Amino acid sequence: MKSRLITRRHTISLASGVAATALFGAHTARSADKSVTVGINLSLTGADAESAKRIEDGAIMAFDEANATGGINGYKIVVTPYDDGSATAGQYDPAQAATNARKMVSNKATVAAIGPQMSGAGKAMAPILSEGNLAIITPSSTNPDITDPKFAAQYRPEGKAIYFRTVATDAFQGPYMANYYADVLHVKTVYILDDSGAYGVGLADAFQGQAEKKGIKILGRDRLDPKAADYTAVLTKIKSLNPDAIYYGGVLQAGVKLAKQAYDIVPKMIKGGGDGVQGPEMLTAVGYPANEGWYATVASPHVTEDAKMADWVKTYKAKFNVDPDDYAVTAYDAATVILAALKQVTSNGKEPTRDAVRDAIQAVKVNTLQGPVSFDANGDLQDKTISVFQIKQDKSIPADDMRQYHYIGIAPSA
Amino acid sequence: MSFSDLLLQQTINGLSLGAMYALLALGFTLVYGILELINFAHFNVFMVGSFIGMWTLQLMGINGQSIVMTGLPLIVTMVLSGALGVLIERVSLRPLRDVKGPAAMITTIGVSYVLFNIILLTVGADSKNYPNPLPPVQWDIGDAVLRLREVLIWVIAVLLMLGLHFFVQRSKMGKAMRATAQDPEAARMMGVEVDRVIVIAFFLGSALAGAGGLIFGLYYNFTSFIIGFTAGLRAFTAAVLGGIGNVPGAMLGGVIIGLIEAMGGQFIATAWTDVIIFSILVLVLVFRPAGLLGRVAPNKS
């Protein structure tokens, strides 16, 4: 019963979406004969829907602004949204993401795309987009594999980079945080833990490699079983070794217990992790004061609190009635990149074909909200920014508000 | 931190873990002793018990330090968890009483997953912050720290285990239990109400699991739908290690497993804990198939 209701509502919203596109299309056909289509694929159904909406809004804001000033050299931008979330998966569904990628490729008017939100969806979409030579820019998926040349045969069988990012990847969170530990926190000795997961082990390995290069002494490395409840044995060992800091690569299933027990056993030690320890559970399940002092990183610049951004944030909020987050900014930047590429292509009077737009994105040098953006041959950002946050309770905002993660600054890149 | 302090601290850690495993192991042993049934639902009765304990504490007001110390939340949690055990027995196991083969054991696995999913779907997948009403009292012994909650775990665990031991050895119902364990048919002929004995075994076992759940929550300050499996599996191992069906054996097994976990984390690596625990289990079973304190059961007529 319930699922039928959802399906029906879904159909209605889809239908109205189609109607709106049709209306919009008719409108553009009258005022300007030329238009290009940009697909946006996000996880609009399920656990990540809230974040998806902010990302979508960020991109749409940039395209609306361009259309309001007459488009790019006479080309209006038509946005086609796709949803890779499904009710059965409760989050992104790689199969749906693949289907969406095929739809994008088969729509001849589509010259570029934005998304996906999730790395798992990206892995499913990348090979299909590569065959269609359709460039996509992700504002939020950070798994390094998709753009890693090692996996080129898998994710870009046609050779050229088609998966671009306006965020950095997990391959930089660990090393940059190692730099932050060494240069800013003056950590001399560290104990490294991971949670046995692919993300956590990779992050901890990357941290360890760079920490050794920076001359931080690794006093030990151990692996937590995320299903176990008791980490006091390893924490007691850490207490006896007395390192300056702990680095934890992993997500919150083990992270919650680690943070709680670490507060009991080594309350004063410096503790930090990647974006895996940046989540509401850290605030609600760990609680204050056990979580205070923990460092977390995010693989994008944190600009929503920047004074220069105040106008942009105000416009966004007025338009969509919600506060933008960092991925709304990277989505706006992704759209800015696509607009710049279109401009570059059409300025010479050329047709904005997929091939031309991809090549223009590859070569782009554009100023965005997060700063100048350009890509390397794999589609990764040239200038990668890792933002560092620290939890400190601010009693004037709710205890579970993500702003309890206070922005500290940018982690050094070397 | 000197080596002896470190050793002391890890012993404290290990004993606390062991006390919790022992409480859980008792439930396995009790039911196995009487029914020769490995009750896998016990894993998640423990997990549900920790949630019952959390809700009880929240209802009583989490600031009620005085209330916690009276033991009222413990009693409420134990009674409700025990009732859950009785319900499981009544609904899913009694109809299978005379069915031969592994049907009953498989049923308990099913019940375990039902409990697991009920909590997952109603409470959610995120870890819950447990109320922490214990006064933050601690004693420093050199560099080692002994906290009130550790002492409390030991005291509660020892009291409950002693209570159970005397109940089984001295009371009339305990005698009926031992009789049923030896030979249900003969016990029935001698006027023992076997169904009642089984219900009481389930009640006691589940109540102890509930106590374990509450203690788990107070000790680690969190609970989640997922805690049953790792703790349950280790407790089950403890029961087998000590000699399944044997009450003092379950206690001994629990303490040994807890100490292995703490010392293994210190001297080898936490990542190897399970390898060590289960290797020792295999070795013990190879050389003493009935477990450390177990005796090979007398032949049943």
Image (tube, coloured by chain):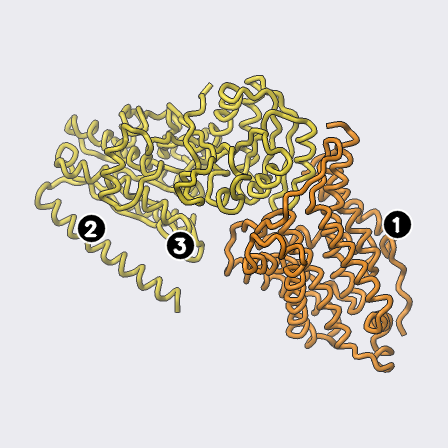
| Separation of residues labelled 3 and 1 (CA atoms) | 54 Å
Q: Earlier in the sequence, mark 2 or mark 3?
A: 2
Are the residues under marks 3 and 1 on the same chain? no
Name the residue that disc number 2 marks. A21
State whether residue B273 appears in this view: yes
| Separation of residues labelled 1 and 2 (CA atoms) | 75 Å
Task: Give the label on residue B287, or none.
Answer: 1
Task: Give the label on residue A86, or none.
Answer: 3
Q: Single out the residue that lies furthest toward the left.
A: A30
Q: Residues within 10 Å of mark 2 (few under 14, many from 20)?
A: some
Chain ID of residue with mark 1: B
Q: Residues within 10 Å of mark 1 (few under 14, many from 20)?
A: few
The quarter holding residue A307 reads: top left
- Which chain: orange? B
- Give the structural element (helix, strand or loop) at label 1: helix
Identity of the residue drawn at 24% across and 58% down: A15
The quarter holding residue A123 reads: top left
Three-letter code, disc 1: Phe
